[in-house]
C-alpha cells in the first residue's frame, strides 16, 4: 500500500514522521501521473504543489482553518490528503470533480474555477472571523503568479492590507506560468525576486556575524535592522507587497517541505496578513511534463506514462483549429487585425497567429476586463482586435463589452471558445450564459456557426463590422458534420423545408449553432410521423432577421433549440420578436435549465437536459398533436 493511502485526513498527515515525507511526496507524484495518464486532468499544476500542499495541511487545521485554492487546477494533492484516493473516474459522471467541490468534502470551500478570486474570498472570511470573535482561526489563500495578474486580486490585496491584525496567510505559488508563461510587469518583478538573493538570508548572515563582534556588533545589527527597507532595496528589487504594508516571507523553495513548513508556521503565528512566496516548478518530478514547453502538462488528455505522448485517437478537425487557421488567413489579408488573449494563447488557438504575426498579438494575463477595454482602445486607434476567450470567462468582462466597446460603437470581435456545454470541467466552465447576457447589449451582433464552413464565413463577416462589437461563439471539441442549406429565408439558412416532406407546415424549428444538426434530425424523425417541419439556422442570433416573422406566421408552432441557458437567450428573443409583430404562433423554447450543471460528458448532459433528437421529437410531436386537437375542438359545428 502506498503511504498516501494511509492518509485519510490532515490529522493523520500531522502524525506522520518528518523523515517519511519524501516517500509520501514520491508516492503522490507516481499516483497522479499514473491516474491522469488514464483519465487526463490538471496534472502539471498538481505535480508542482506536492510539498507545498503537504506543508499546508501539516501547519494549518483544515477545515477549521480554511485552505482556499485560486482556480483549483492544483487541488488534486489536497483531495488526496483529505481522504479522496479514488481517481478512476476523475472529471467523469459520478467521479471526483476536477476542481474543489463542496459536495465532496468539508475541506473544499470554493468551487468557482475562475482565476484571481481567492483573495476576495479570503478577505471576506477573515473579516467574518473578526466579527464573530473567532480570532484564532487563520484563513489561507493559495494563488498562482498567473492569477495575480488579475485586477480583482489587487483590489482584494488593497483591502487585506487595510488591517494588520486579521489572520490571513497568502501563499503565492510562483511557477512563472498560468497555462503558459506569465506575462506583464508583475511577472517580470516576480522573476527578479526568483533570481535575487533573499533579504532574510542576508540579514540572518549579518546577525550571526555581527553578534560575534564584541561591543559594537549588537548595536550595528540593530541599526541595520532599522534600515531594513533600504537594505532590502539594495539586496533585491523593491518588494511591492511590503509597500502595501503586508509582511513578506520568501522567496522559498516550494519543493523543500521543511522550509515551506517553517515559513508557514512563522506566517501563522504572526497574527496578521502575511505573504509567503514559494517558488515551484509546474510538472515537478515527471520529466515529460517538466520539459513540455507549451504548458508543462497543464491539462493533458490520456497519455503514455513512459513517453508522455498522447494516446492515439481519431484525427478530427476541432473548432479551435478552424478558428486558428482562419485568423492566420485574416492576418495575411488585413494588417489592421490583431489578436488578444487573457493568458490563453494556446488553448484558444491564437498561438498560430502569434507564430506568424508576433508583433500583432497581445497576451494581457488573466485580466479579461482589461482585455476588453484595451481592445476598445485599439479599435478607436484604427485596428480591429480579435479577443479570443472561453465563453465562461466573457462573463467577467460584461461591463466592459457593454459600456466600453458597445457604448463607443467600436469594432471589436470577441471569439468565444468552449461555448455551450463543455461538460467535464464542471459548473463554472460551461459556456451557457453568453447568449443571455449579451442580448441586452445595444448594437452588438452575435454569430453562432453550425459547422466549420460557417465559422470561417461568419468570422470574416464579424471583422468587417467596424461600428459595433461582434461575437462569434463555438463549442469545444470536434467540428460538427457540415449541413448544407436547401434555401434561404431572408439572410438565414433553410436546412429543411416542410413542403419538401410532402406534409403541411406544422412546425418551424430555429436551430442555434451546432444544435442545428439536432434540429435536422428532429425534422427527419417527425417527417416519418407525417409532420411537416421547417428548420432554419439564423446564423446571426443577434439581431434576429425579421424574415423570421413571416416564416413563423406560416407554421402552426415555432420551437427554438439552443445550447445556452433558457432564460433570456435566443428562445426569448424569438418570442419577443413575434410578439412585437403581433404574430400569435405559439413558441416552445428548448435549452439548458438555469442551474449549475455537474461534471459529465457533453453528450450525457445534453441527454439529461432533454436536448437529444429522440426526446425533442417526442415532446414536439406531442405538442403538435395537442395543437391539432385543440383546433379541431374549437371549429364551429
Image (cartoon, rainbow, N blue to C red):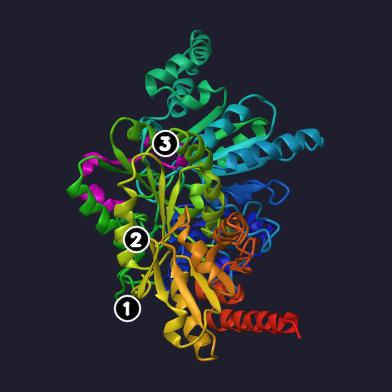
Q: Does the CB distance between marks 3 and 1 fall below 8 Å?
A: no
Q: Which residue is mark 1?
A: 314
Q: Quadrant of the N terminus?
A: bottom right
Of pointers 1 and 2, the one earlier in the residue sequence: 1
Q: Which residue is mark 3?
A: 409
Q: Measured from the top left, where is residue 257 in percent x and y?
A: 51, 48
Horizontal placement of 628 versus 329: left or right? right
Question: Was residue 371 drawn as part of the magenta stretch in this picture?
Answer: yes
* Residue span colored magenta: 349-375
Type of secondary structure dominating the magenta stretch: helix
Q: Is residue 19 visible?
A: no
Tell which of 328 and 45 is nearer to you.
328
- Residue at 69 percent across and 49 percent down: it is 61
Q: Measured from the top left, where is residue 72 in percent x and y?
A: 54, 53
Can you say whether 49 is above or below 124 in the image?
below
Of pointers 3 and 1, the one earlier in the residue sequence: 1
Q: Does the CB distance between marks 3 and 2 fall below 8 Å?
A: no
- Residue at 67 percent across and 25 percent down: it is 163
- Mark nearest the camera among 3 and 2 is 3
Q: Is residue 87 visible?
A: yes
- Mark nearest the camera among 1 and 2 is 2
Horizontal placement of 347 versus 16: left or right? left
Residue at disc 3, secondary structure: loop
Horizontal placement of 333 versus 338: left or right? left
Tell which of 260 and 564 is nearer to you.
564
Q: Measured from the top left, where is residue 469 in percent x and y?
A: 41, 43
Q: Toward which corner of the image does residue 155 lie, by quadrant?
A: top right
Can you say whether 553 is above or below 13 in the image?
below
- Mark 1 and mark 2: Cα distance apart in space: 16 Å
Tell which of 217 and 272 is nearer to you.
272
Quick one: label 1, few (<14), some, or many (20+) residues within 10 Å? few
Q: Which residue is mark 2?
A: 320
Amino acid at each position: 500500500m502506498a503511504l498516501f493511502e494511509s492518509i485519510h485526513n490532515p490529522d493523520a498527515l500531522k502524525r506522520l514522521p518528518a523523515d517519511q515525507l519524501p516517500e509520501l511526496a514520491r508516492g503522490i507524484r507516481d499516483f497522479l501521473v499514473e491516474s491522469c495518464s488514464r483519465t487526463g486532468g490538471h496534472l502539471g499544476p498538481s505535480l508542482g504543489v506536492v510539498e507545498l500542499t503537504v506543508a499546508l495541511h501539516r501547519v494549518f487545521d483544515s477545515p477549521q482553518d480554511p485552505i482556499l485554492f485560486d482556480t483549483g487546477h492544483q487541488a488534486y494533492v489536497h483531495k488526496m490528503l483529505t481522504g479522496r484516493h479514488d481517481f478512476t473516474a476523475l472529471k467523469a459522471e459520478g467521479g471526483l470533480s476536477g476542481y474543489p467541490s463542496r459536495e465532496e468534502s468539508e475541506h473544499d470551500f470554493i468551487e468557482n474555477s475562475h482565476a484571481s478570486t481567492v483573495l476576495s474570498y479570503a478577505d471576506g472570511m477573515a473579516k467574518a472571523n473578526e466579527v464573530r470573535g473567532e480570532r484564532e482561526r487563520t484563513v489561507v489563500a493559495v494563488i498562482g503568479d498567473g492569477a495575480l495578474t488579475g485586477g480583482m486580486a489587487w483590489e482584494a490585496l488593497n483591502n487585506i492590507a487595510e488591517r494588520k491584525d486579521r489572520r490571513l496567510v497568502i501563499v503565492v505559488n510562483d511557477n512563472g506560468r498560468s497555462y503558459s508563461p506569465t506575462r506583464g510587469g508583475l511577472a517580470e518583478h516576480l522573476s527578479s525576486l526568483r533570481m535575487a538573493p533573499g533579504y532574510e538570508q542576508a540579514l540572518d548572515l549579518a546577525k550571526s556575524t555581527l553578534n560575534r563582534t564584541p561591543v559594537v556588533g549588537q548595536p550595528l545589527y540593530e541599526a541595520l535592522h532599522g534600515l531594513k527597507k533600504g537594505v532590502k532595496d539594495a539586496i533585491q528589487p523593491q518588494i511591492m507587497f511590503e509597500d502595501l504594508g503586508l509582511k513578506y516571507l520568501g522567496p522559498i523553495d516550494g519543493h523543500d517541505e521543511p522550509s515551506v513548513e517553517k515559513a508557514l508556521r512563522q506566517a501563522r503565528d504572526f497574527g496578521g496578513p502575511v505573504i509567503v512566496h514559494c517558488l515551484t516548478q509546474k510538472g515537478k518530478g515527471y520529466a515529460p511534463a517538466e520539459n513540455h514547453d507549451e504548458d508543462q502538462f497543464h491539462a493533458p488528455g490520456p497519455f503514455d506514462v513512459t513517453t508522455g505522448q498522447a494516446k492515439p485517437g481519431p484525427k478530427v478537425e476541432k473548432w479551435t483549429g478552424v478558428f486558428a487557421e482562419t485568423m492566420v488567413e485574416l492576418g495575411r489579408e488585413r494588417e489592421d487585425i490583431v489578436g488578444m488573449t487573457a493568458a490563453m494563447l494556446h488553448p484558444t488557438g491564437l498561438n498560430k497567429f502569434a507564430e506568424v504575426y508576433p508583433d500583432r498579438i497581445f497576451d494581457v494575463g488573466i485580466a479579461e476586463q482589461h482585455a476588453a477595454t484595451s481592445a476598445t482602445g485599439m479599435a478607436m486607434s484604427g485596428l480591429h482586435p480579435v479577443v479570443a476567450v472561453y465563453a465562461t470567462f466573457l462573463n467577467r468582462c460584461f461591463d466592459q463589452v457593454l459600456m466600453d466597446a458597445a457604448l463607443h460603437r467600436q469594432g471589436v470581435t470577441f471569439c468565444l471558445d468552449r461555448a455551450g456545454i463543455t461538460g467535464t470541467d464542471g459548473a463554472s466552465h460551461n459556456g451557457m450564459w453568453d447568449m443571455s447576457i449579451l442580448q441586452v447589449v445595444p448594437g452588438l451582433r452575435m454569430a453562432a456557426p453550425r459547422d466549420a464552413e460557417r465559422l470561417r464565413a461568419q468570422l470574416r463577416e464579424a471583422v468587417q463590422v467596424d461600428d459595433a462589437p461582434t461575437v462569434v461563439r463555438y463549442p469545444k471539441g470536434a467540428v460538427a458534420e457540415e449541413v448544407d442549406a436547401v434555401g434561404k429565408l431572408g439572410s438565414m439558412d433553410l436546412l429543411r423545408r416542410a413542403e419538401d416532406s410532402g406534409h403541411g407546415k406544422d412546425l418551424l424549428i430555429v436551430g442555434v449553432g451546432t444544435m442545428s444538426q439536432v434540429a435536422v434530425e428532429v425534422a427527419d424523425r417527425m417527417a416519418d410521423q407525417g409532420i411537416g417541419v421547417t428548420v432554419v439556422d439564423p446564423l446571426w442570433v443577434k439581431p434576429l432577421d425579421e424574415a423570421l416573422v413571416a416564416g413563423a406566421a406560416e407554421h402552426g408552432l415555432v420551437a427554438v433549440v439552443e445550447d445556452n441557458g433558457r432564460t433570456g437567450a435566443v428562445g426569448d428573443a424569438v418570442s419577443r420578436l413575434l410578439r412585437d409583430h403581433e404574430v400569435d404562433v405559439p413558441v416552445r423554447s428548448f435549452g439548458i435549465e438555469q442551474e449549475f450543471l455537474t461534471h459529465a460528458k457533453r453528450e450525457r448532459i445534453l441527454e439529461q437536459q432533454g436536448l437529444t433528437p429522440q426526446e425533442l421529437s417526442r415532446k414536439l410531436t406531442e405538442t403538435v398533436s395537442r395543437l391539432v386537437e385543440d383546433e379541431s375542438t374549437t371549429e364551429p359545428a
